Image (cartoon, rainbow, N blue to C red):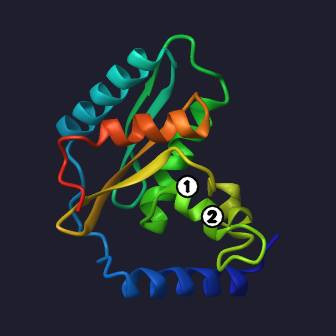
Amino acid sequence: MMNRGETQLIERLVTAALERRGVAPAPAAGLSLAEAEAIAARAQAASVAMGVPVVISVADATGDQILFHRMEGSLPASAALAPGKAWTAAAFRMGTDELGRLAQPGGMLFGVESTHDGRVVAFGGGLPVRRGGTVVGAVGISGGTVDEDMAIARQALNGISNE
C-alpha cells in the first residue's frame, strides 16, 4: 500500500508526462447523456457482432459515471471492472492499456494500481474521450479478453472527435 506522499508523487509524474504530451486539463463540461447513450449503443453493436456480452460504463471528465449498461450474459465481475476502467481512463487521461504498460515493474507508474483505494484498473478496456485534445469523458468496457474489450471500446468511440 502506498502512502499519501507516494500517491501525490505519482500524480505529479502523471501530470508532468501528460503536459509533455500536450494533453490539456479536463474542462468543466463533459459528455452529455445523449452522447453517452450513443457511445453505449456503438459498444453494444460491436459486442453483439463479436458475440461477447459486456458491461459498458461511460464517465464524464472527472470519472463520475454517466451511464451504466450491463448486457445479458456478461460476467458478474465486469459490473465493477467497466466503471473502474472508465474512471481510470478519465482520471489518468490515457487508455487503461497504456497505463498498464507504464505500471509494469520498472515502469514510471509501477504500483499505481494500489493507489486510489484500489480503484485503478491497469489493463485494457478503458479509453478517454477527447475533443480538441481535451478529455471530456471516458468509456470502460469489460467482459471479453483485453483485446476484445479494447476493440469494443475503440468501436464505441467511432464518430466522436477523439483528437
Are discs 2 and 1 less than 8 Å apart at CB? Answer: yes
- Above or below for 156 versus 130: above
Residue 140, relative to residue 46: is it above or below?
Answer: below
For image coordinates 62% across by 53% down, the residue present is 121
Relative depth, front residue between 8 and 158: 158
Residue 102 in which image quadrant = bottom right
Identify which residue, 128 or 77, lies in the foreground. 128
Does residue 98 appear anywhere in the picture? yes
Residue type of the residue flagged with mark 2: Arg
**Label number found at residue 101:** 2
- Residue at 70% x, 57% y is 118
Q: Which mark is residue 97?
A: 1
**Quarter of the picture holding the N terminus:** bottom right
Label 2 crowding class (10 Å Cα cut-off): few <14, some 14-19, many 20+?
some
- Which residue occupies 24% across, 41% down? 158
- Residue lying at 63% horizontally and 87% vertically, measured from the top left: 9
Q: Position of residue 19 (x, y in %)?
A: 38, 85
Q: Is residue 34 left or right of residue 92?
A: left
Height in image: 159 above or below 9? above
Is the C terminus in the top left, top right, bottom left or bottom right quadrant? bottom left
Relative to 58, is 12 on the left or the right?
A: right
